């Protein structure tokens, strides 16, 4: 259990598949080294669960491998519990970091029983300590009765929990999990992610999880870092990521919503085609005096599906362009009079046909807007 | 990487040596070869390749289709039993066939004396060789085509039927063309075995390159002539290799998802009976009858022949096969590890080259490795004399070295396959998981890799062991004096026409040969689980 700090870490990557032959190396084209992560900084407090969230290829797995000690870094440093474990040109060996890892494919040892898998990292301990710790962990993950089975006899969810127990057994300073639920079906995924959070909290472990699934990130993590093109776009609580996205990428990647054009009127008002929104305008518009410069401050305003409410009495009309039935509600894609699109969540007893015009009104709590270039 | 390159060189050496033999032409021998020997050899080889290619394809594909796609009585048994002929080296099938069907054999005698019938086609003929080789080698096509049909046949057929084709049309227009790369790969393996075969050709007195190399070696005492013949044989082999490698690439592209066969084709009672009779006949002729005959002959001679000499042959066989298998597995393991450490295209090509030896006939390898080792030997003796006044006799030549090297080159692929696929099953994540749990390199090897590889290593060793036991030409041509093995004994007895006395050593080889088939079947069923 320890704090994890990444301080402006970068990593680039020489394209693999180069031949090992000397002449080939000497004559290899000077490939542009692809930068995988750039200037990555965040602090994960002791005992907290953090999550790196991002589309595939954003560098999150590489970040994990840097932390676990399988990839070197080119700039910055990585500290675990105050101890520097990686800096340019030097890294503490993976087996000496006391960092546990849960792999996407679990990577259980097929030739060992569940108990032996869990006990694999407890080599130095006495037999009785080892047995006690194994029993404790199997109970924690709810697999007490499966101690003598082999991994292939377990279901995917059970294998996942064995992998977690195995990583937790040596009491690592930090647990890393790479897409831990991606091999499981959707229902199991949600249940297990709550379970895993519970287990991690009970062991009071600092944990960093990598995923591309925001529901997973939100249900598991205390802190989420949204990654894109090797950089952290925003490191924040799940609530803030949704309600106060720092930039367009985060706004687009986290949750659903649409951007509509707007004009800033003054420092607490913005006008969009559906009306004027009041509240703090998080865009620096130099709108202090003259009308001219106010008019020139164009923004895009983020409208979440719950920001637009259906109201049959409203005079504001929008055409239903598409609809998706979600059980309790419909998610309507609406075409606004100007032709811009917006989303609206509507209770499902309001069943309107595609092409129909329905009344809407705004219900925006706080304004999220980005300056338009 | 360096290690992988050295192993790959080991394959290239015999090839280069044999080709370089054209540099030192022994005029009269070469003239004799080109005028009298070559035309016949080339003709014989072409006929053989054509006939056996056709034979194994027809037998292998038809049986594979019946077993993989149709339902008829005994299908489950035929599924694995049709592989049994693999346990019989072709030379064993060959001498049993001659013993049974020759003019003085029981069948002709019975027909002649009981019914006054004569004029059964002569078994010692081109047709006879082709028949025997086809019966011995069809399992290569059968095994690989059966997998192809089982994985994609059902989908293909259903797709074809949904597009309005009849089942027969579906087979010929969709399923068969789809399986073509698989069939071609199996056929090429069978043809490589055909080109490499020495024992059968010697028994049938059918002159091909392998027998000619042997004669040049022992009768003409001309290494150069043997090497020149070997290099021509290599050209034939290379054609087969190119075809085989090409079909393998196509197999990768053509592979579609696995499908469980939900519904087999229900044959009408008549057709089902015909299918049973057909598969049963092939099995009987290719395996049951020869083995029974071997057993009967063995019973006649066992009292006289099961003596100390026999045990010496058996011991030599086991010793050589064991040494060879150990060496092959060790080198295969190192080669596979090299690939794990340094993945990349260059490594893949090096590995492919290093395992290409399976294509080279044993007779070629014997010649190709004997020449450089003898040269090295002479150099050692000369320099030993010059520098140390040491009057040595041959140091390397005639020792086990040439033989073991030849085994290594020829059977490395056999051992490399299971070891490499076993190593591939240990993913990078498994390594990293172990290291995250505090295990260093040594612990990784002893606690994770070796336990996980145990089954693969055992399979590799067993398959290699049995292949070396069956091997004839390398052993025959390079064995040190007094190192007669079971296979050598079979050769000596059959060359004197003493079929009964060849039966006892053959039976031991056949029994050993059944082991890999059990492994193969067992692995197959495990895969289906």
Image (tube, rainbow, N blue to C red):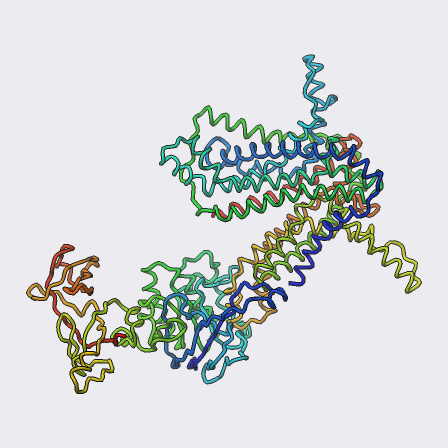
Is B79 rendered above or below residue A321?
above
Q: How many marks?
A: 0
Q: Is residue B18 left or right of residue B443?
A: right
Is B180 rendered above or below residue B23?
above
Q: Position of residue A351 (x, y in %)?
A: 13, 57
Is A200 rendered above or below residue B494?
below
Question: Residue at coordinates 44% horizontally, 25% vertically from top-left?
Answer: B269
Q: Is residue B510 left or right of residue A263?
A: right
**Looking at the rendering, which quadrant does residue A144 occupy?**
bottom left
Q: Is residue A123 left or right of residue A54?
A: right
**Looking at the rendering, which quadrant does residue B295 occupy?**
top right
Question: Residue at coordinates 16% horizontally, 68% vertically from top-left?
Answer: A308
* Residue most extreme to the left: A313
Residue B221 appears anywhere in the view: yes
Asked whether B68 or A119 is in front, the reply is B68
Q: Position of residue B74 (x, y in %)?
A: 51, 32
* Residue most extreme to the bottom: A289
**Looking at the rendering, which quadrant does residue A358 occupy?**
bottom left
Residue B287 appears anywhere in the view: no
Q: Position of residue A231 (x, y in %)?
A: 39, 75
Asked whether B256 or A111 is in front, the reply is B256
Asked whether A171 or B499 is in front, the reply is B499
* Residue most extreme to the top: B116
Q: Is residue B512 left or right of residue A168?
A: right
* Residue most extreme to the front: A292
Q: Quadrant of the N terminus of chain B?
A: bottom right
Asked whether B82 or A348 is in front, the reply is A348
Q: Position of residue A22 (x, y in %)?
A: 63, 66
């Amino acid at each position: 259990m320890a704090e994890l700090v990444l301080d402006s870490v970068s990593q680039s990557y020489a394209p693999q598949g180069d031949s090992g032959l000397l002449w080939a190396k000497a004559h290899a084209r000077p490939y542009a080294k692809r930068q995988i992560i750039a200037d990555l900084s965040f602090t994960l407090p002791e005992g907290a669960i953090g999550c790196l969230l991002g589309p595939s290829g954003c560098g999150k797995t590489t970040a994990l491998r840097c932390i676990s000690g399988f990839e070197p870094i080119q700039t910055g440093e990585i500290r675990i519990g105050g101890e520097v474990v990686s800096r340019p040109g030097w890294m503490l060996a993976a087996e000496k970091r006391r960092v546990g890892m849960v792999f996407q494919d679990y990577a259980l040892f097929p030739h060992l029983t569940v108990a032996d898998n869990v006990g694999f990292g407890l080599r130095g301990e006495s037999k009785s300590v080892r047995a006690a710790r194994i029993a404790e962990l199997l109970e924690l993950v709810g697999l007490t009765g499966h101690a003598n089975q082999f991994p292939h006899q377990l279901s995917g969810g059970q294998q996942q929990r064995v992998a977690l127990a195995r990583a937790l057994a040596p009491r690592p300073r930090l647990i890393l999990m790479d897409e831990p639920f991606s091999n499981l079906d959707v229902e199991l995924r949600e249940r297990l992610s709550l379970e895993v959070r519970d287990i991690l909290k009970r062991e009071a472990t600092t944990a960093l999880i990598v995923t591309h699934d925001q529901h997973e990130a939100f249900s598991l993590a205390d802190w989420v870092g949204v990654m894109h093109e090797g950089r952290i776009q925003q490191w924040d609580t799940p609530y803030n990521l949704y309600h106060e996205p720092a930039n367009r990428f985060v706004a687009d990647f986290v949750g659903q919503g649409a951007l509509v054009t707007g004009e800033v009127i003054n420092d607490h008002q913005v006008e969009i085609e559906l009306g004027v929104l009041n509240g703090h305008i998080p865009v620096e518009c130099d709108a202090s005096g003259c009308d001219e410069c106010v008019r020139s401050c164009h923004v895009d305003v983020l409208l979440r599906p719950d920001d637009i409410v259906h109201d049959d009495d409203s005079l504001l009309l929008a055409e239903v362009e598409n609809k998706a039935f979600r059980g309790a509600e419909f998610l309507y894609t609406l075409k606004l009079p100007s032709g811009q699109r917006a989303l609206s969540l509507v209770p499902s007893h309001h069943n309107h046909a595609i092409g129909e015009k329905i009344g809407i009104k705004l219900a925006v709590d706080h304004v999220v807007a980005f300056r338009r270039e | 990487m360096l290690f992988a390159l050295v192993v790959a060189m080991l394959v290239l050496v015999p090839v280069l040596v044999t080709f370089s033999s054209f540099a030192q032409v022994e005029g009269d021998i070469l003239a004799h070869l080109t005028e009298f020997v070559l035309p016949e050899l080339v003709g014989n080889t072409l006929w053989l390749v054509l006939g056996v290619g056709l034979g194994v394809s027809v037998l292998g594909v038809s049986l594979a289709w019946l077993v993989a796609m149709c339902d008829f009585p005994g299908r489950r048994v035929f599924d694995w039993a049709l592989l049994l002929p693999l346990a019989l080296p072709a030379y064993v099938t060959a001498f049993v066939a001659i013993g049974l069907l020759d003019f003085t054999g029981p069948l002709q005698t019975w027909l002649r004396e009981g019914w006054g019938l004569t004029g059964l086609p002569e078994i010692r003929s081109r047709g006879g060789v082709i028949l025997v080789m086809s019966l011995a080698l069809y399992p290569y096509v059968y095994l690989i085509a059966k997998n192809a049909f089982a994985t994609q046949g059902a989908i293909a057929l259903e797709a074809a039927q949904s597009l309005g084709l009849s089942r027969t049309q579906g087979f010929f227009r969709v399923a068969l063309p789809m399986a073509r790369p698989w069939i071609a790969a199996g056929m090429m393996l069978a043809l490589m075995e055909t080109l490499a075969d020495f024992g059968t050709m010697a028994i049938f007195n059918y002159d091909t390159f392998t027998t000619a190399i042997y004669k040049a070696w022992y009768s003409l005492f001309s290494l150069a002539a043997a090497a020149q013949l070997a290099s021509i044989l290599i050209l034939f082999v290379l054609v087969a290799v190119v075809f085989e490698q090409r079909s393998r690439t196509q197999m990768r592209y053509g592979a579609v998802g696995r499908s469980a066969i939900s519904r087999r084709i229900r044959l009408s009672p008549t057709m089902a009976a015909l299918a049973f009779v057909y598969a049963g006949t092939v099995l009987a002729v290719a395996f049951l009858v020869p083995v029974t005959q071997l057993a009967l002959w063995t019973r006649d001679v066992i009292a006289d022949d099961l003596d100390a000499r026999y045990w010496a042959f058996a011991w030599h066989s086991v010793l050589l096969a064991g040494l060879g298998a150990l060496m092959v597995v060790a080198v295969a393991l190192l080669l596979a590890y090299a690939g794990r450490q340094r993945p990349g295209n260059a490594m893949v090509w090096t590995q492919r080259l290093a395992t290409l030896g399976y294509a080279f006939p044993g007779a070629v390898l014997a010649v190709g490795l004997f020449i450089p080792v003898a040269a090295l030997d002479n150099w050692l003796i000369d320099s030993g004399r010059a520098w140390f006044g040491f009057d040595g006799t041959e140091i390397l030549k005639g020792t086990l070295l040439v033989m073991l090297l030849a085994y290594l080159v020829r059977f490395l692929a056999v051992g490399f396959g299971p070891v490499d696929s076993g190593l591939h099953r240990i993913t990078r994540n498994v390594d990293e998981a172990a290291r995250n749990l505090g295990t260093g390199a040594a612990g990784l090897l002893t606690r994770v890799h070796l336990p996980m590889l145990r089954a693969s290593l055992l399979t590799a060793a067993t398959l290699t062991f049995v292949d070396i036991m069956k091997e004839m030409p390398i052993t025959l041509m390079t064995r040190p004096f007094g190192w007669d093995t079971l296979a050598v004994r079979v050769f000596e007895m059959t060359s004197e026409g003493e079929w009964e006395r060849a039966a006892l050593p053959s039976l031991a080889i056949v029994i050993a040969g059944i082991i890999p088939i059990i492994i193969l079947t067992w692995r197959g069923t495990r895969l289906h689980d």
